[in-house]
Image (tube, helix red, strand yellow):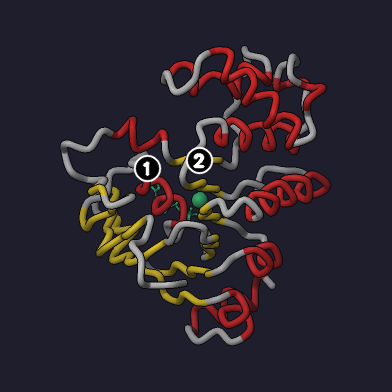
Amino acid sequence: MPTDREPLIHVEHLQKSFGDHEVLKDINADIYAGEVVAIIGPSGCGKSTFLRSINLLEKPTGGSISFEGVDVLDKSTNVNKLREKIGMVFQQFNLFPNMTVKKNIMLAPVKLKKMTEEEASVKADQLLARIGLSDKADVHPSKLSGGQQQRIAIARALAMNPDVMLFDEPTSALDPEMVGEVLLLIKDLVKDDMTMIIVTHEMGFAREIADRVFFINDGVIAEENTPAELFGNPQNERLKDFLSKVL
Ligand code: ADP
Ligand code: MG
């Protein structure tokens, strides 16, 4: 990635401990607009903690994060404004069960006064068409498959026109036959040059869509490289061991 421009996200010496359990020890990373970064690593290594630190769902215990040049950890930073720019998709879809699919997608932009009800409605219709679920606008999430619910969760995050999308194992809770439709949708976002950070155990997918892959181990990014290099020619012993188990 070009280094002649400012990164969208700049992470320096990031640390996060829960009590005396030091999960993130020293994370350093630059993520540029339009990049797709996949994060891999053993369960419990801190992938979610790292992702959640970026929009302050976890409060780091040390280091710094800047987002679009703004110091995320500065007391004067408006966390809600920050989160408006950062779409997040979780393993569990977290849709609001008491609302229709379309209302789920419209809620945040209207509530946060980013759009009028009408604008949000138009946007929701566009997103539903894009994800191929226009006919489900008025049903409740519980009537839908896991794959459909996750596609709607992605649409809901996109409704805010975020500058970056964070995905935390978006397919891990899905039955195998539904993984493909969600990966296909994420792949489609690559075409829009959406900046994305994706924690995933789908190595084939990471290899296919990521510009760079980060391997987190023992609280640091132990190796980062293009997918071809990282998967084809891993250097770190723990990465070699990890890949031998998951590939
Ligand atoms: P990963 O996503 O890589 O599987 P996590 O970031 O979820 O790992 O968790 C990293 C470590 O931090 C784990 O040991 C987990 O138990 C611990 N952890 C995560 N969240 C909390 C929390 N809220 N309180 C205490 N420990 C936590
Ligand atoms: Mg996790």
From what the image shows, is residue 11 above or below residue 152? below
Q: CA distance from mark 1 to mark 2?
A: 9 Å
> Which quadrant of the figure has residue 182?
top right
Q: Secondary structure at mark 1?
A: loop
Q: Are marks 1 and 2 in contact (CB under 8 Å)?
A: yes
The residue under label 1 is: 55
- Residue 230: x and y in percent read 56, 79
Q: Residues within 10 Å of mark 2 (few under 14, many from 20)?
A: many
Q: Residue at x 78, y 29 (%)?
A: 133
Residue furthest toward the left?
Answer: 75
> Which quadrant of the figure has residue 139?
top right
Quadrant position of the C terminus in the picture: bottom right
The residue under label 2 is: 88
From what the image shows, is residue 30 above or below residue 168? below
Q: Which mark is residue 182?
A: none
Residue 2 left/right relative to 154: left
- Residue 108: x and y in percent read 49, 23
Dot 2 beta carbon under 8 Å from ligand 2? no
Q: Residue at x 56, y 51 (%)?
A: 194
Q: Residue at x 49, y 23 (%)?
A: 109
Disc 2 marks which amino acid? Met
Viewer-side residue, 119 vs 148: 119
- Residue 34: x and y in percent read 51, 58
Q: Secondary structure at mark 2?
A: strand
From what the image shows, is residue 58 above or below residue 31? above
Across the whole image, how many numbered discs are drawn on residues?
Answer: 2
Q: Residue at x 56, y 68 (%)?
A: 211
Residue 51 left/right relative to 61: right
- Residue 210: x and y in percent read 59, 65
Disc 1 marks which amino acid? Asn
Which mark sits nearer the N-terminus, 1 or 2? 1
Q: Residues within 10 Å of mark 1 (few under 14, many from 20)?
A: many
